[in-house]
Image (spheres, helix red, strand yellow):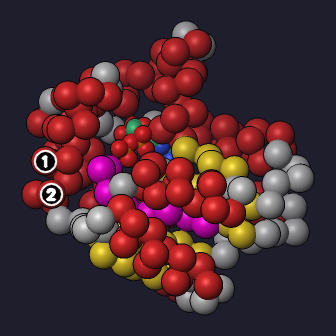
Amino acid sequence: MLNLVLFGPPGAGKGTQSQNLIEKFGLIHLSTGDLLRGEITQGTELGIEAKKLMDEGVLVPDSVVIGMISNKLDANKDAKGFIFDGFPRTVAQAEALDNLLESKESAISGMIALEVTDAELEQRLLKRGETSGRPDDANPEVIRKRIKEYNDKTAPVAGFYKNQNKFTSINGIGAVEEIFDSINTVIASY
Ligand code: ADP
């Protein structure tokens, strides 16, 4: 199985590159952000709770996102592999993901990190906010909060995969196709 973790701050281009990877490798895309927004649209209890936190730019509890991922892994038993996008976002989530995959006799192939500067991120998110309809993209204060949450809680997840020799970082600034080529070079090395 090819199980990729796409890593990088909000606005790094994980969603865009995920679409390319789905087409090329037939992987199942698991974006916790998209799953949470789906819960919000459906008006579930989980969605109502998550919305408050997401609108402030803070992370939702680990147990919530781990539960969602677990359900999706169970629902896609015959998958060729998965792209994890926006997950794991804390070291506790990374540990839980290893355990979930191990119980299915599988494992993470590698983490690929997209490197983008904070100034570029803020620009991209504000631009996305003009059309995405996402409240968390429209407000500079919330964007800065999300980048801070990333630096405090999510950046350490890179160390978790470095310790397992599963971490590669690539330049996330440039043409979408160029970045996709770099990702493919990493995958070819697995
Ligand atoms: P972005 O990467 O652009 O910030 P996402 O769509 O991945 O966007 O996430 C939006 C929001 O959803 C986050 O700010 C956070 O509140 C919540 N969220 C998404 N994934 C997770 C996760 N794995 N753990 C905790 N919160 C999450």
* Kind of residue at disc 1: Gln
* Kind of residue at disc 2: Glu
All told, the count of numbered labels is: 2
Percent x, y of residue 88: 53, 56
Above or below, comparing residue 27 to residue 63 in the picture:
below
User: Left of 93 or right of it: where is 7?
Assistant: left
Q: Residue at x 16, y 38 (%)?
A: 126
Q: Are marks 2 and 1 in contact (CB under 8 Å)?
A: yes
Percent x, y of residue 38: 56, 24
Q: Quadrant of residue 57?
A: top left
Above or below, comparing residue 102 to residue 79 in the picture:
below
Q: Residues within 10 Å of mark 1 (few under 14, many from 20)?
A: some
- Ligand 1 image-quadrant field: top left
C-alpha gap between disc 2 and disc 1: 5 Å
Above or below, comparing residue 143 to residue 3 in the picture:
above
Quarter of the figure that contains the C terminus? bottom right
The residue carrying mark 2 is: 120
User: Left of 85 or right of it: where is 148?
Assistant: left
The residue carrying mark 1 is: 123
Q: Which residues are magenta?
A: 4-12
